[in-house]
Amino acid sequence: MRPTRYTVCLALALAGVTGAASAQPRRPVATTVAMVHPTSDPPPGWDLSRADDVLARIQRAATGDARRGALEISSALLAGVEPHVAAAGLDTLGVLARPESADAILRFLDHRRVSLRRRALIAAARLHTPAMLRAIDARLADSDPDVRAEAARTLADVADPTSVRALWAAFEHDAAEGLGSEGSTLLQESAHALGARGTDRDVDRLLTFLRRAPFGALARAFEASLRRADLPDPVKLRVVQAIAGIATPQARELLTRLVDEHRGRPTPSIDAARSAVSRIQ
């Protein structure tokens, strides 16, 4: 399951983690430290050996001054905390979205635990700095497939044009592998990011893969591009015509959804989709 996004109530998220922590016996943090090599001193007054106390302090820090809260939570994470505490801290740093949390987030993007790398990715997306974008781009080559897919989803949310080259590299690598009728999760997510956020040229370039990459991996990308208000209608028309040329049941299903979503709003691309649906058996 994907880590909690920012629209979810932070208090509920922290309460869930706190409940899990309270059921565990207290033990020295050194036995399950999240960071292998701590790099910071803990914030004054924080006892990192008591997980429930740290979780409570994270919750208080999240509701006070955002700058101070980000500094305190970041210091605690860099000093070394248990993994479930680190997870709550990263979720909170993502909500606060303060530049003071950059060092901790960057460090956890390279963490040995997959779940913490994924949470760090979500937090990193809120900062929009060049260093963060480069770090997210690097996760497209992560050793874990879930982290690679999360990085592609994150770049789709960030919508930064500087990441397009990295997304194409990830997409083309997995497109060459084949990997079944749907392709890999990274192939699907990187294609979707390019279709949803790429330029006209990126969408046209995706069309060249229609008969080379699994259609299931490209369908969401083209649906996203056809829903974009900023994409010129001639580009959308080319997408519809290319999909209609495949003439498969999957292509007909996609075009049918497009027509149903745009009833009463005729455009050249919608008219072409309606015509294609009537022809494809």
Image (spheres, rainbow, N blue to C red):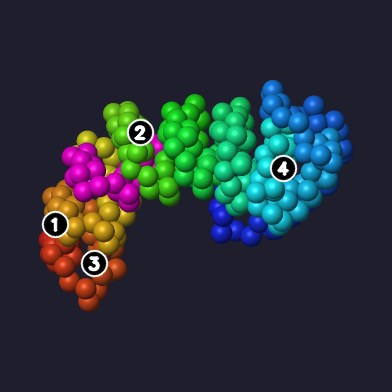
Tag 1 near tag 4, CB within 8 Å: no
Which residue in the structure is indicated by mark 4? 72
Q: Determine the residue positioned at 20% across, 44% down.
A: 201
Q: Label 3, label 2: how many angstroms apart (C-alpha)?
A: 33 Å
Say whether residue 25 is visible.
yes
Give the alpha-carbon distance from disc 1 to disc 3, as whole Å: 17 Å
Q: Is residue 5 left or right of residue 186?
A: right
Which range of residues does the magenta coloring cover? Answer: 181-210
**Does the stretch in magenta take in 182?**
yes
| Pointer 1 or 4: first along the chain | 4
Packing grade of label 2 (10 A; few <14, some 14-19, many >=20) is some
| Residue 72 falls in image quadrant | top right
| Kind of residue at badge 2 | Ala
Going by the image, does 163 lie left or right of 66? left
Up the image or down, 176 lies above or below 43; here it is above
Which is nearer the N-term, disc 4 or disc 2?
A: 4
Mark earlier in primary sequence (1, 3):
1
Q: Position of residue 215 (x, y in %)?
A: 27, 44
Residue that label 1 marks: 234
Residue 142 locus on image (x, y percent): 48, 29
Numbered tag placed on residue 259 in the rendering: 3
Q: In the image, 90: left or right of 184? A: right
